[in-house]
Image (cartoon, helix red, strand yellow):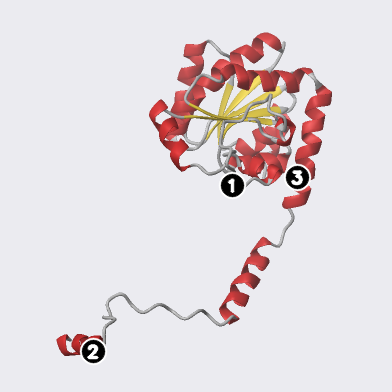
Amino acid sequence: MYDEAFLSAYGRHPGPLVAILPGSRNQEVEGNLRWFLKAAGMVQEAIPGVRFAVAAFKPRQAELARRELATAGLDADVFTDKTPELMRLADCCMAVSGSVSLELLYHAKPTVVLYWISRLAYRVQGYFRTVKYITLVNLLATGEVESKDISPFDPNQPDAEKVLFPEYLTCEDKSWRVAAHVIEWLSDPARRNARVKALEALREQVGHGGASSRAADYVLNALWTTPPALPRPHFLAREAGGEARIRARA
């Protein structure tokens, strides 16, 4: 359910709206919000009349956002419990990678994704990550569940248009990259509309119902199938007479 009164009142404000979604965990907000606000400053210089709204998950995070905004000298609204409404009203979004990307797909909102981590964490993740993209929407759009190429997304790569949410997993300052995507969408309606259409097409492809019933059918079919022979329990000795010795000890 949406807050219709909020939608009606806030939707009447003039100027394009950029929603900033800095994550739900404190460490995500602390690591990413400053870069979003730096990018917002660049967007503000390029797009007259643009508005920004921060969707805070908790009151504590809302207070952090207000302090960061004051430090940055940036004018933006901060709300808690209004994330769906801001997604619906926004012209485009900046977001931390996570399940929120699926909500943004539902709303078909052009979005640039950032996930800033420490230099050490960035180095470590390179040893474990097996996918090129970290955003769920991009994994759905490209079909690349696993890839030998785990290099970061580059907007100049040959298949960049297939990556519906430009994403930046980084330990560096990518605020200018984030700002560039938002500026492009707000200054070029044709490119923004093309991205919206691509998101709507993907939503139509993967967003239909029936997942729960299909999962239940799969489980039932698996249960009716003859299970494979279970391996011998590890505590039973394999040599002849092992069972007898275990019984004797018992």
**CA gap, disc 2 to disc 1?**
47 Å
Which of 69/221 is in front?
A: 221
Viewer-closest of 173 and 129: 129
Farthest residue toward the left?
A: 249
Q: Position of residue 239 (x, y in %)?
A: 26, 83
Of circles 2 and 1, the one toward us is 2
Going from the N terminus, do you reach mark 3 or mark 1 first? 1
Q: Secondary structure beneath disc 1?
A: loop
Residue type indicated by callout 3: Leu
Query: Residue 177: horizontal and vertical position, in percent?
Result: 62, 20
Q: Which residue is mark 2?
A: 241
Q: Are marks 2 and 1 in contact (CB under 8 Å)?
A: no
The amino acid type found where label 2 is placed reads Gly
* Image spot of residue 166 (x, y percent): 65, 30
The residue under the point 55% across, 20% down is: 174
Where the C terminus falls, by quadrant?
bottom left
Q: Which mark is residue 14?
A: none
- The nearer-to-camera label among 3 and 1 is 1
Q: Which mark is residue 202?
A: 3
Residues at circles 3 and 2 in contact by the CB criterion of under 8 Å: no
Mark 3 or mark 2: name the one nearer the start of the chain: 3
Q: Which residue is mark 1?
A: 146
Q: Quadrant of residue 82?
A: top right
C-alpha distance separating marks 3 and 1: 20 Å
Who is closer to the viewer here, 179 or 151?
151
Residue lying at 62% horizontally and 76% vertically, measured from the top left: 221
Q: CA distance from mark 3 to mark 2?
A: 62 Å
Q: Is residue 223 above or below residue 53?
A: below
Q: What is the count of numbered marks?
A: 3
